[in-house]
Amino acid sequence: MKTLIAAMVIAPLLLAGALPASAAPSTQVAATADDGKADRASYSDQARKELLDWRRKLQATADQGKAEGQQASAAASAELNLAWAKADTAAHKLEVAGAADWDMTKAAYEASSHDLADTWHRIYPGDR
């Protein structure tokens, strides 16, 4: 009889002690999901900073050309502006991409960013 009473008293305590352990995996999964979201946000911020740098570089080059009386060809300017616009659009998509489409969106941004850099280096080969 004493063991039955002891079991009835101890069992709920053991079960109560087990609850936090069973809750830990869901907390860990939530933390992992938050880490992934934070990583995506960090990458998006970095992409935005890179595009701002490109925008400044394009504007400075245009301003310098105007000051020196040199105009880049209209085709070259249009090509650079188009490459920048594509990279900018891809960067905006990074900001709203979810986990399911993140890899595809990131790859599209990286491709457009590389295209912008390639376009720049083709037009201004001495500026690496």
Image (cartoon, rainbow, N blue to C red):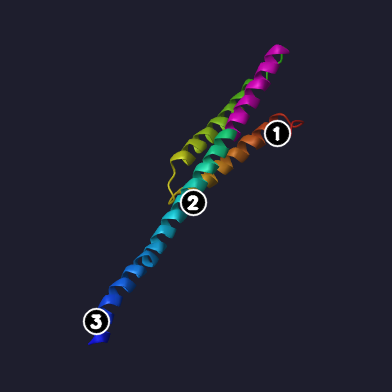
Q: Earlier in the sequence, mark 2 or mark 1?
A: 2
Q: Quadrant of residue 117?
A: top right
Q: Is residue 116 positioned above or below 3 on the image?
A: above
Work out which quarter of the rendered image holds the C terminus and state it.
top right
Where residue 109 appears, as percent x and y from the top left, is 54, 41
Question: Which residue is pictured at 42% across the width and 47% down the height?
Answer: 98
Where residue 101 appears, as percent x and y from the top left, is 44, 49
Say few, some or many: other residues with alpha carbon within 10 Å of mark 3 (under 14 / 14 to 19 / 20 or more).
Answer: few
Q: Is residue 74 positioned above or below 123 on the image?
A: above
Q: Nearer the viewer, mark 2 or mark 1?
A: 2
Q: Earlier in the sequence, mark 2 or mark 3?
A: 3
Question: Which residue is pictured at 66% across the width and 37% down the height?
Answer: 118
Residues at discs 2 and 1 in contact (Cβ within 8 Å): no
Residue 35 numbered mark, or none: 2
Marks 3/1: CA–CA distance: 82 Å
In magenta stretch: residue 35: no
Residue assigned mark 3: 5
Q: What kind of residue is marked 2?
A: Asp
SS class, disc 3:
helix
Question: Which residue is pictured at 50% across the width and 50% down the height?
Answer: 103
Q: What kind of residue is marked 1?
A: His
Q: Is residue 94 left or right of residue 21?
A: right
